[in-house]
Amino acid sequence: MPDAQALLADLKALDDVDGAVVWRAGEAPLGDLAENVSPVAPGLLASGIGTMEQVVETVGLGKVDELWFLTEAHQGLAVRLGDWQAIILVSLDADIDSLRNAVTERLERQA
Amino acid sequence: MRPSEIIEHARQAFREGAPDRAVELAEHVIARYPRHASARLVRALKAEVDGELDQALEDLRFVTSAEPLNARAAAATARIFKLRDDDARAQDEARRVVELVPDVSDNASLESALDILGVDADALPMTPGVFARIHLRSGWPGTAERYARRALDEEPDRIDIRLTLAEALWQLNRLSQCEEQCTIIFDRANDCVRAAVMLAHVLAERGRMAEGQDLLGRAGEIDPEYLEARQMLAQLEIHRLVLPDVPQIDVPTSIRPSDGAPEAATTPSTSPDHQAPTVAEQPSDDGPAMPEGDSEAEPAAAPDGAAFTQIDWARELIRREDWREAERVLREIVEEEGLPEVDVDALLEEAAGRPAFAATGWQLLGDFRMRTHRPQAAAEAYLRAADSPEATDA
């Protein structure tokens, strides 16, 4: 858990990151999101991404490494590396490519 | 008190040679739930002791219809047939007891059956029905199905074997075939709780929620705490049925249990290793005594050495509505490795079923399902957490 907390703090400290969720396979997700977001949001985001991964794998498309989504106010990026997964929520004008590299780099340190 | 707690006191009174007291407690439950199977079984056993065999058989027929896998009811039925010199039916029932493979907590039923059959345990026949039960209990529904079908080829009227087959199909997620078997079971035993739960689930999965809930409600007349349903549905990753809150019955002071230490009534487990534990001290309104005023204390061991597990402690805290402490213990359980998923799922569903704890309970269930690699089921739990009102402080 300390690893997850440190990783979460690290991700949250990245420029343009408004919120983050991290978890390792076999553990409950840990999140740091905006105060006005539902307290179950980290769990919902993590389980939703996990479900999407299962769906993609079940239909034979292989294992998901990254998922990106866009809403009217946010970009969301989920990255998996080995046992570790992270989701970051960033503003619409953030450079998602450089953030993807930063998240991957931090997950590699954990793996 | 929960009806199952009252019945545990009644069973204990029976074991201690106080059948009058046992039936008094059972009747109190029957007054509220006339179709409560466990209470009707206690009443039947008392009638058997009193030699009122017709009355005993009437209750036993109902119990066997509701719970075809109940070895105690089958053993009592066998004994009554034996008392009536109906040896053929007595032996049929006794064979059924053997094939139900009662667990170690029910040695008395097996001994009754062996006595009637006139054989030692060494000479027990290993029939396809026996193998079907063993394989189902061991978590091998595929082989259980094959053995159950072989057993039904020989004895197509055996409802207990057909129920074993239906449960194997249910576990294999072959719901149409399961439904077919449950329909046959209902033709012969239209009170069967386990068949009702399976059929309710099948209906709900087909979008016929109202019919599913209605059927589940009928099972609730027999098992008002939905113990069987909770245990069975907890095996699923996800289900749409809504289980009502656990009911409580006021027990008048005149019959309120005051002596003895009954087994704690718990959600039944699929594993014989998780039988209802013995409560450490005599029950009171506050339930079994746990370390008081020391939230860090571990659960007490029962005087006879039986462990009072962390799951039992959590269930007791839920019953006491000590939400702060319950949350602490439940979080420990969620983070503990190696606990049976089915037991923890059932415990957390029970906690989440309490309105004051719903938000936290569903969130913990979501966390547990994530930890056990079930994201889809976790999402369902988290969504319920999001829809639940905030828990109130204890």
Image (cartoon, coloured by chain):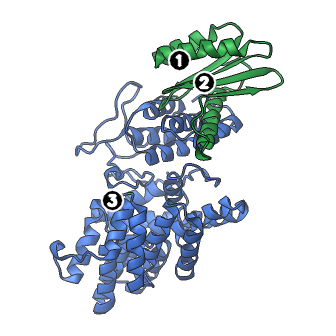
Which tint was used for chain B?
blue
Callout 2: helix, strand or loop?
Answer: strand
* Chain letter behind tag 3: B
Q: Position of residue A83 (x, y in %)?
A: 48, 27
Q: Dots 2 and 1: beta carbons under 8 Å? A: yes
Q: Position of residue B15 (x, y in %)?
A: 29, 63
Q: Position of residue B130 (x, y in %)?
A: 32, 72
Residue at horizontal 34 percent and vertical 46 percent from the top: B279
Structural crowding at the residue carrying mark 3, measured as other residues with C-alpha within 10 Å and reported as few (<14), some (14–19) or many (≥20): many
Closer mark to the observer between disc 3 and disc 2: 2
* Chain letter behind tag 1: A
Q: Which residue is mark 1?
A: A107
Chain in green, by letter, is A
- In this rendering, do the residues under marks 3 and 1 share a single chain? no
Regarding residue A82, the answer to whether it shows in the image is yes
| Three-letter amino acid code of the residue under disc 3 | Gln
Q: Which residue is mark 3?
A: B12
Q: CA distance from mark 3 to mark 1?
A: 57 Å
Horizontal side, residue A54 vs residue B293: left or right: right
| Three-letter amino acid code of the residue under disc 1 | Leu
Q: Which residue is mark 2?
A: A79
